[in-house]
Image: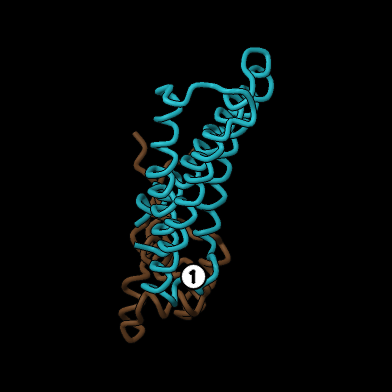
Chain colours: A cyan, B brown
Amino acid sequence: MPFRERTAWLSLIAMAVTFGPYFAIIFAGYLPARPLPDLRQLGLFALVSIVRMFILGIGYLYIRYESPQEARTPLDERDRAIKSRSISSAYYVLMFGMVVVGCFMPFSSTGWAIINASLFMIVAAEVVHYGVVVFCYRRQA
Amino acid sequence: MMEGSISNRIRALRFHNGEMSQAELGQRIGLTRQTIAAIEAGKYSPTLEAAFRIAEVFNVPLGEVFQWEAAPTH
């Protein structure tokens, strides 16, 4: 499996094990809305971010240790084409999300509801980004 | 639009050039081994520049590396 596909898998897994439970807790309503700044929400978000950075850091170092030469190789034309396709796919998800969050939600929601909705759309765009990377490498493997 | 597919003889050309490895070919033209494997398998079409570079490595015209096979028309 190419180095860049493995790093994309790592990002997807890190996202799933951190933001998966985070949004499950949020959408299940285990954290009732409180006035800003809601320190419980903030704490949960900080914890998820730290765990995600930890997983990404350790995972990246391990993958790099496994294939040091590939890690040093610059992107070639196929890597760049895959990167470009994945970013353009994620762009549409992010644009849709920002329109919903930025143009519609302020009329109906406030505080952490808006923050979590924008976080969700960013995470969705990232999932599409790395998902397309994995899909393209798999299809052309 | 004309339907068809691109095939290539990279595997055969590598064999006739001292069983050159995919990694070595990739290194000589600035592509990764995985990209060479994808081109060989017909799963990725290289840029025109990369195609010319591959032909240059084997010292053959471009048409000997890549061929266009038109789909039969009914």
Whether residue A51 is situated above or below residue A79 in the rendered picture: above
How many residues crowd mark 1 within 10 Å: few (<14), some (14–19), many (20+)? many
Q: Residue at x 49, y 79 (%)?
A: B28
**Is A140 rendered above or below residue A3?**
above
Image quadrant where residue A91 sits: top right
Subunit bearing disc 1: B
Q: Is residue A119 above or below residue B64?
A: above
Q: How many marks?
A: 1
> Who's the residue at 61% across and 25% down the image?
A114
Task: Report the residue at 52% width, 32% height from top.
Answer: A120
Quarter of the figure with the C terminus of chain B: top left
Residue occupied by mark 1: B31
Name which residue lies at 55% across and 30% down: A116
> As displayed, is residue A2 above or below residue A49?
below
Question: In front here: A120 or B67?
Answer: A120
Q: In this rendering, would A2 be left or right of A42?
A: left
In depth, the one of B23 and A13 nearer the eye is A13
- Residue closest to the eye, A11 or A89: A11
Percent x, y for residue B13? 36, 76
Locate residue B22, reporting x and y percent: 37, 74
Horizontally, is B20 left or right of A90 in the view? left
Kindly state the secondary structure of the residue where label 1 is placed. loop
Coordinates of residue A76 in the picture (x, y in percent): 53, 65
Which residue is farthest top? A108
Q: Position of residue B33 (x, y in %)?
A: 40, 70
Amino acid under disc 1:
Leu
Position of B64 compared to B56: left or right? Answer: left
